[in-house]
Amino acid sequence: MKLTKVDSLPALLSYYSDIWKKNWHDSIVITKKDLAPEHYQALGKKMIETYYQRYAPFDSDITIHTEMRLDFVLDDENKHKMIGYIDRLSRTRDGVYWIHDYKTSAHLPGQEDADNDRQLGLYHTGIQKRWPDIKEIKLVWHYLAFDRELVSSRSEETIARLIAETANLINNIESDEEFPSRESNLCEWCEYPDLCSMRKHFYTVEALPVNEYLSEPGVVLVNKYAELRQKAKEVDDEIEKVREAIIDYAQKEEMTQIKGSGHKVRVKFDKKLKFPGKSETERKELDDAIIEAGRWMEVSQLDTTALIGVIEGGLWDKELIDEVLKFGRIEESSSVYLSKLKDEEI
């Protein structure tokens, strides 16, 4: 609401229709092949309608700013500078400031996701640093496709921990000398594919004529690798079928060794004790039973995968990370993964 003028729902829908027609063009890529532009236009219309019906006449708070830019620093030394944009900042009559973040996602997260979200916490930090006299700040995610709000807040302790973790993460990034590529849906819009280890070859070969493309060394190697992997899969499938037939034959004939023309196979039937894995529902009950008996340390082991995640994410303080890293080592490894090209990559 600006200058006390409240637009009607029909006026907003008409405006939405106009800007859709003005800005839509055929080069916009729809990744979900079973959906057409009309589906997305209809979804946008529905979001406007449900939001309007929920909050009209929009007099429950005062909008202070929309698309509000935040520039702030995390530390007193002005080392860790942050920039962000808040969708909408408002204040209710009871003096509470609300940071609104509008989401059009087709996925609805849980309350825990909102309570642990770094972005919302940094928004809170930026507003508090701009107006230190603000006593209470609420954070709200508006999931428009579901007509749902997820409201969250941050305590002083939580904000202090977030600032420390974020500063530590920035320090780790700035001190790093390697920046591995991370592929995502945004790669198609990147302006620097020739500098990226994951997109460089795509950039190199896309302009080649067919005869040169098919003989380009990288293309030849990948095609040969894919061909051999397919043959290997067919062989592995055949081996598994024969293996199952051998086991079935040995069980029926009560044999543990079978003779062939130039080879023999030995079949061993074992029974092994097994407990629930980490992803199974009974695992927590098993863990609790051993912990309550005071015997946990006799059977527990450090989860080094989780430890690496904590170190790389900068989730502990620097002193502890440095102490733990004394026991770490860097090992080089190589892996090759084969996958089909997406339609837009062909």
Image: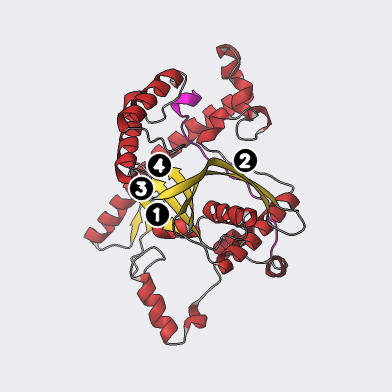
Per the image, label 3 sits on a secondary structure element best described as: helix
Residue named by callout 3: 240
Residue named by callout 4: 105
Residue 233 coordinates in the image, percent (x, y): 42, 39
Q: Earlier in the sequence, mark 3 or mark 4?
A: 4
Give the residue displayed 58% in from the left and 59% down from the top. Answer: 309
Per the image, label 2 sits on a secondary structure element best described as: loop
Give the residue displayed 71% in from the left and 58% down from the top. Answer: 75
Q: Earlier in the sequence, mark 4 or mark 1?
A: 4
Q: Earlier in the sequence, mark 1 or mark 3?
A: 1
Give the Cα separation between the discs numbered 2 and 4.
Answer: 25 Å
Please identify the quarter of the rendering in which residue 328 is found: bottom right
Position of residue 315 in the picture relative to residue 273 (left or right): right
Q: Earlier in the sequence, mark 2 or mark 4?
A: 4
For the residues bearing labels 2 and 3, Cβ distance under 8 angstroms: no
* Badge nearest the viewer, 3 or 4: 4
Boundaries of the magenta span: 328-346
* Badge nearest the viewer, 2 or 4: 4
- The label shown at residue 150 is 1
Residue named by callout 2: 181
Residue 43 coordinates in the image, percent (x, y): 33, 33
For the residues bearing labels 1 and 2, Cβ distance under 8 angstroms: no
Give the residue displayed 59% in from the left and 53% down from the top. Answer: 127
Amino acid type at circle 4 is Ser
